[in-house]
Image (tube, helix red, strand yellow):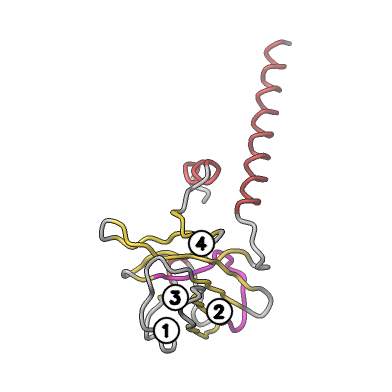
Amino acid sequence: MAKSLNLIKKEYLVIILIGVGFISNTQAVSTPYKGGKVEVSIKENTPCFSISNVDEKGDYTVVVLNLSKKIDESWSYESNFQRNYPSKNNCILLNKSNFNQFNKIQLNSPYNVTIGGVQRAYGLDFCVALKNNQYEIHDYMAGKCTKREISLWEKFLNWLGLN
């Protein structure tokens, strides 16, 4: 009987930990965009944009805005989800061939990227930093560019191969 109670306690502990991780993860990725966050990575030394939702249909627009008060610039890209889905393996590079009048990205300047489809929009504020001759994507929060920190929950999901 005592063994089964210990087993039940462990099961409840696992359920509670998963619940707390889920709640903290949903709070961490809270976003004003109905679709969620745009995923920004570095590819060919430039930001590359994607989304993880694979169910979108129709036309979409990617808009990148420089949020710096010193510079007023924006770039846009238009496509169709069926023709060019912005997935992790097929991300949209921020370059002259994709974005109208793109010149170059300013290091440590805040930017916003929005991918807007027919039903949902995805967005993210970010910065690009250079560290050890490698470009990195940083979060832009509370007026500062800060290095992305992976939460314990995200590390756990990565370890399980679920993220």
Spatial CA span between label 1 and label 2 = 15 Å
Q: Secondary structure at mark 3?
A: strand
Dividing the image into 4 quarters, which one contains the N terminus? top right
Packing grade of label 1 (10 A; few <14, some 14-19, many >=20) is some
Q: Are marks 1 and 3 in contact (CB under 8 Å)?
A: yes
- Residue at point 53% right, 80% down? 63
Asked whether 31 or 57 is in front, the reply is 31
Looking at the picture, which amino acid does disc 2 mark?
Phe
Q: Crowding near pointer 2: few (<14 within 10 Å), some, many (20+)? A: some
- In the image: residue 42, left or right of residue 85: left
Question: x, y percentage for residue 13?
Answer: 67, 28
Between the residue at mark 1 and the residue at mark 3, the CA separation in whole angstroms equals 8 Å
Foreground: 110 or 97?
110
Comparing labels 2 and 3, the label whose residue is closer to the camera: 3
Residue type at the position of mark 4: Tyr
Image coordinates for residue 48, horizontal then vertical, percent: 42, 70
Amino acid at dot 1: Asn
Instruction: Name which quarter of the figure residue 12 lies in.
Output: top right
Residue 7 tag number: none
Question: Which residue has dot 2 on it?
Answer: 81
Q: Is residue 43 magenta?
A: no
- The mark that comes first in sequence, 2 or 4, is 2
Say which element carries label 2: loop
Q: Spatial distance from mark 4 to mark 3, Cα to Cα?
A: 20 Å
Does the segment drawn in magenta span residue 57?
A: yes
Residue holding disc 3: 92
Find numbered disc 1 in the image and state the secondary structure of the residue it sits on: loop
